[in-house]
Image (cartoon, rainbow, N blue to C red):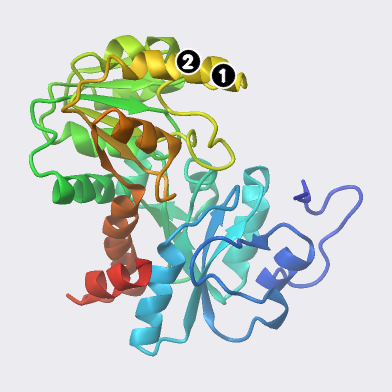
Amino acid sequence: MVFKKLFGGDNERWKGPKTIKKLFEKEFLHVAAQPKDNALDPKSIGNKKLYFFPIDHDYPGGSAAMHNAVFKAYGMPKQAAFVIGDPANVGTIVDVLKEDPLYDGGGAGSGFKDKIGPHLDRLDQSAEAIGSVNVISRESGKLVGYNTDGIGFVLGLLHEYPNCIEGQKILILGAGGTALPIAYEMSQRNPSEIVISNRTVSKAEGIAKLIAPFTNARAIGEDGIGEELDGVGVVVNTSNKGAQPNEKFSAFAPMTGDVEGDMAVTMANIARLPKEAIVADILLEPLTTTMRLAQDNGNRTHSGRFMNLFQAVPAFKIMNKLQDENLQTLMTGALD
């Protein structure tokens, strides 16, 4: 899929009002195919308020289905959809969303969470402190960024495995836009330490430094994953390894492109993983390669569907100012 790189450049000028419809016409955005209940015809956008979740590749996210289920239940003239775009164009995309009154908020998914913040009008304390945005709300005409990823992940994990963080060594794999909010929220639950692994060690070091006031925190390169699996209590994959388009790899090892070689490293590392450890994934595929290998090793696993649900309820309340005890029930049903 090819995206336009710039807007208003040497070969193309933006003429007329900046509208969501033109973002699709000029191929800055495409409607994602895989998310449930994501149908949107860009050519026939009417007067419904729109909630968009920009992502950098197609995957089966659940936020649109959950929001649309609530909109339908309450007769709200609104529609949510995942849209695919190039994060390099985030400034252009947000500039148009600000000007089109049909855009009423939404969120940010893969590739956009740690890039969209500077282009919004304001950040809530949660997003400003973490440097990552997953919720966008239009408030008095301004776009305001929030982050509910970390608390959503922790609430989902503790819902399935109560008291699984306190006193445990936590290993977080990846240092992208979701890693910091998760690391921060886990640091508030009294783990023995949190270790962040990433190919670019400096990014992991940045996260470790930010959460160091709350818990013992260290950063390592991916070549140290095997050693750090010794004695670990919870492993959290925040990378895109193990799911499309990287389903031939796992988060337990570096991804060099050598499928057989990388899998050999994975298996050697998994041999050091304690059987009682929990392996969690933030990815939404029903069974990622990382989770399948953990299950084969006898470990308990935790699906990204939990985080998706437990972050969506507070996100919906922020965007729609709707307080209702039935939200979680409606959203849970939308994921089935």
Position in image of residue 257 (x %, y %): 62, 22
Sort mark 1 into few (<14), some (14-19) or many (20+) by Cα contacts within 10 Å. Answer: few
Residue placed most toward the observer, 104 or 64: 64
Position in image of residue 170 (x %, y %): 22, 26
- Left or right of 238 on screen, residue 45: right
In the picture, which quadrant includes the C terminus?
bottom left
Q: Would you say the residues marked 2 and 1 are in contact, meaning their CB atoms lie under 8 Å apart? A: yes
- When the figure is inspected, residue 198 is found, relative to residue 307, above or below; the finding is above
Q: Residue furthest right?
A: 11
Q: Residue furthest bottom?
A: 75
Residue wearing tag 2: 264
Asked where in the image residue 82 lies, by quadrant, the reply is bottom right
How many numbered badges does the structure rendering display?
A: 2
Q: Is residue 157 visible?
A: yes
The residue at the point 36 percent across, 72 percent down is 334
Sort mark 2 into few (<14), some (14-19) or many (20+) by Cα contacts within 10 Å. Answer: few
Identified by mark 1, the residue type is: Glu
Position in image of residue 39 (x %, y %): 58, 74
Q: Is residue 137 visible?
A: no
Asked where in the image residue 276 lies, by quadrant, the reply is top left
Residue placed most toward the observer, 212 or 233: 233
- When the figure is inspected, residue 67 is found, relative to residue 295, above or below; the finding is below
The residue at the point 13 percent across, 27 percent down is 191
- When the figure is inspected, residue 44 is found, relative to residue 13, above or below; the finding is below
Identified by mark 2, the residue type is: Ala
The residue at the point 30 percent across, 56 percent down is 311
Dot 1 lies on which element? helix
Residue wearing tag 1: 260
Q: CA distance from mark 2 to mark 1?
A: 6 Å
In the picture, the disc for residue 3 is: none
